[in-house]
Amino acid sequence: MTVNADSTFYRVVASPGGAIATVFLATVIFVAIFADWLAPYSFEIQNLPMANTPPSVAHWLGTDEFGRDVLSRIIHGARTSLKVSVVAISVSVCVGMFLGAMSGYLGGIFDRIVTAVVDLTWSFPEILIALIFVAIVGAGMYSTMMAIGIAYLAQFTRLTRAQILSLKNETYVEATVSLGAGPRHVVFAHLLPNALPPIIVAAMLATGDGIILEATLGFFGLGAQPPIPSWGGMMSNGTAQIFTAPWIIIFPGLMVALSVIAINMLGDSLIRALDIRSQVRPA
Amino acid sequence: MSLLAVDNLSISIGNVTLLDGITFSVDKGKVLGIVGESGSGKSLTALSVMGLLPLSRGRIRSGSVIFDGIDLTGLREADYRKLRGNRIAFIAQNPMTSLDPVISVGDQIDQVLRLHLKMTRKAARQRSIELLSQLRIPEAAEVCKLYPHQLSGGMKQRIVIAMALAADPDLIIADEPTTALDVTVQAQIIELLVQLVRQRDMALMLITHDMGVIAQACDDVVVLYAGRVAESNEVGAIFRQQNHPYTQALIGCIPRAGMAPGSLKGIPGSVPSVSSYASGCRFHPRCPAAADVCRTQTPQITKTADGGHVACHFSAGVQG
């Protein structure tokens, strides 16, 4: 594969932070996808005689209170955490962009209703909205997804609406209208593509937050239900053994922290890479 | 019959009347210049023909705009959309901002062709490259792949012109197409535009504040002052003899080679704002020939001996 020296991807990995973050996240995603083959032990079969063994050659990251291999559970937990966060934020971005574009472009009563609802949810912390939603729908992986998606909806609706509002007065919008373009073409071909860069970056950062939110809900026992491992759930189990077997809580916590840092670093280098005006004309 | 006939058009925003009784017409294959200072209503006239007044919250109060037998003043938005770009095209003032920064320029021209002529992607691109070659852009196929920020102002304006020409419209409205460009490129662009318009037997409405551009490109000219027509005539006639003191003053502002230093005159006073239009003839506070009647009575548009129209009480008195 040849990498175009002008592409956004190239400019992301050309920065040290972006490169490290990309490699780390690619590894985590790879491990999550091939968890069934890569995990040295099963994530659910208990082995009580081996409970709470510290990290060793056999169990690199030790075992938990049921004798399950912590590394294997972190590997399978990566699948849960990433899936929940990525799916939730993707849905949130799509719905938020649609609502934001509609309300920004159309204005009027529709805009006022959307803005009122969005401002209302915006005034609550995300965690509270997610908790309320899970309390209503019940715990589990899919309700966690929906809860996170709804919690971030306001952010993307607002961001898109603000972008559209400023873009729709651009001369090139007037120019395309004067050449016969209809509203659908204006919104989808001109407004949304121009609004995209900040939304991509916000989505990236929100994915990091989504992982934390998923871990938090898991910690409260509201996320994926046992025996399916999630990083938050593992930390929740580990609190009881925090002084006797600290590895049970430390390693999943470390994974949450590293993943979120990596996503933030990637987001930062994306901000720089997506600034199309910083590119020079190819010779 | 004229291709475009604007008759007694008045436009207001809120309850302020910005255009008052504008009348002019453009024939096929002709170039009409609309000239006036900033704020005289040139751009508003263009917007009203394009049906884009709602963008600036304007409203047609009276008068008619007839394009090829269709009354545009009562046209539904959906029908208007079929005209725009297809039969009437618009070239905006500033090429720097009238192209979408995230779409390659080729794609932007293609979009017009695909929308109005229902061309396939491939056919559209081929036609775009042809258009750009006609606009004397070297390596047009390569330029199509570039983004607006990679092009110079003159190149961008050529792209904008290509978009306007793409669907072979009958009328092109160019709103000060060269004000944002270097003087050296200005003449080139105007010449190119006029040449293409004449080749294709289109009509062009060229809005400018530059009498030099009028002299270079136009067949007929309408002089606007403070939202009213001051004078209109054929270009040769207007440069030979100005029937309105404002036109005379405008032509007096053109610098000529060999002029003594300091002898270039401006027009004393400044363009009145909409809220403080003078009574009677709106030019009278700046007019060297103003008399009492100018302060009290609005001059009517009358036909002159040389075939033009003028709105001045003393049009005979300013001759010569």
Image (cartoon, rainbow, N blue to C red):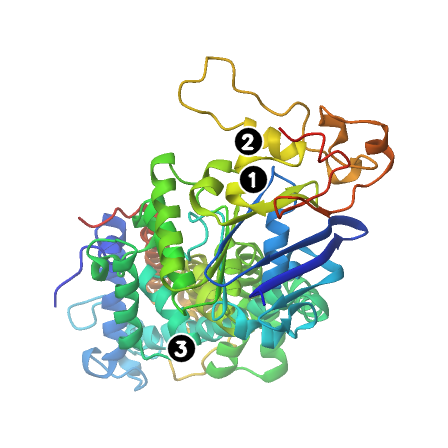
**Residue nearer the viewer, A249 or B157:** B157
Q: Height in image: A163 above or below B188?
A: below
**Residue nearer the viewer, B97 or B123:** B123
- Please give the label number shown on residue A143: none
**What SS does tag 2 mark?**
helix
Q: Residues within 10 Å of mark 2 (few under 14, many from 20)?
A: some
**Residue nearer the viewer, A54 or B84:** B84
**What SS does tag 3 mark?**
loop
Chain containing the residue with disc 3: B
Tell me the residue at 65%/33% (across/down): B246
- Please give the label number shown on residue B251: 2
- What x and y, as percent, mark residue A159? 54, 59
Q: Is residue A212 visible?
A: no
Q: Earlier in the sequence, mark 2 or mark 1?
A: 1
- What x and y, as percent, mark residue A32? 28, 75
Q: Earlier in the sequence, mark 3 or mark 1?
A: 3
Tell me the residue at 47%/71% (across/down): B86
Tell me the residue at 25%/71% (across/down): B126
Query: Which residue is disc 1 drawn over?
Result: B238
Left or right: A191 as drawn, with respect to B22: left
Q: Earlier in the sequence, mark 3 or mark 2?
A: 3
Disc 2 residue type (three-letter): Ile
**What SS does tag 1 mark?**
helix
